Amino acid sequence: MFVKEIPDSEYASFYANYIKKGGELSLLVGLEYGMAATKAFFESIPEDKLEYRYAEGKWTVKEILQHLIDTEHVFVYRALRFARQDKTPLPGFEQDDYVLASVANRRTRAQLLNDYLDLRESTIALFSSFSKKMLEQIGVASNAEMSVRAIGFVLIGQEKHHIDIIKERYL
């Protein structure tokens, strides 16, 4: 399953940038590669940059990592519901509220990375269990239709997006 196989009709336009960042790797390889690359990237960040904000009201590096974790939890839940043909529309979530409530800056880098790695292993296991038909299932979240496979590529692309932002604005 590759990004080029996903028609635009399987996701809302506001996810297009993330989907495109999914790259040329297959979904499962992209999730696995992303896990290794993200771990190595966050381990390379100097300790004094982990709670740095480049502007008032912007997230810290720790908060960005927690955001990646929270988003993956929410989107994997959506993927499971859609794969199981649950047609109940799912609400959106307010990412800024999640970050504020997360108290990510009280946690260590190791704690955050362990949570991330455990979650990503679980995500890979879940997506590995989906059949082609399940990956093509469509559900509604945040008032927009989305396929299970698009969700997987959004996770990959969103991770790359935030790493690029950290490189450009934090380091």
Image (cartoon, rainbow, N blue to C red):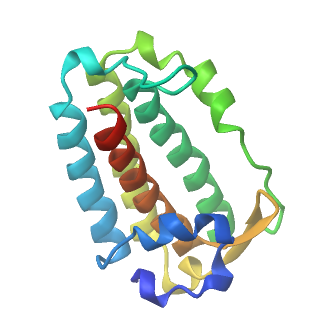
Q: Is residue 13 left or right of residue 109?
A: right
Does residue 69 show up? yes
* Residue visible at 38% across and 28% down in the picture: 61
Does residue 117 show up? no
Q: Depth check: give the residue in front, 116 or 143.
A: 143
Q: Is residue 147 above or below residue 165?
A: below
Q: Is residue 27 left or right of residue 110?
A: right
Q: Quadrant of the C terminus?
A: top left
Q: Which image quarter: residue 88?
A: bottom right
Q: Depth check: give the residue in front, 94 or 36.
A: 94
Q: Is residue 53 above or below residue 73?
A: above
Q: Depth check: give the residue in front, 88 or 33.
A: 33
**Residue 45 spot, x, y in % from top left:** 20, 29
Q: Which image quarter: residue 27?
A: bottom left
**Residue 112 spot, x, y in % from top left:** 36, 27
**How many numbered discs, if any?**
0
**Residue 109 spot, x, y in % from top left:** 29, 22
* Residue visible at 57% across and 85% down in the picture: 133
Q: Quadrant of the N terminus?
A: bottom left
Q: Is residue 79 left or right of residue 160?
A: right
* Residue visible at 32% across and 43% down in the picture: 168
Report the residue that reaches farthest toward the top.
106
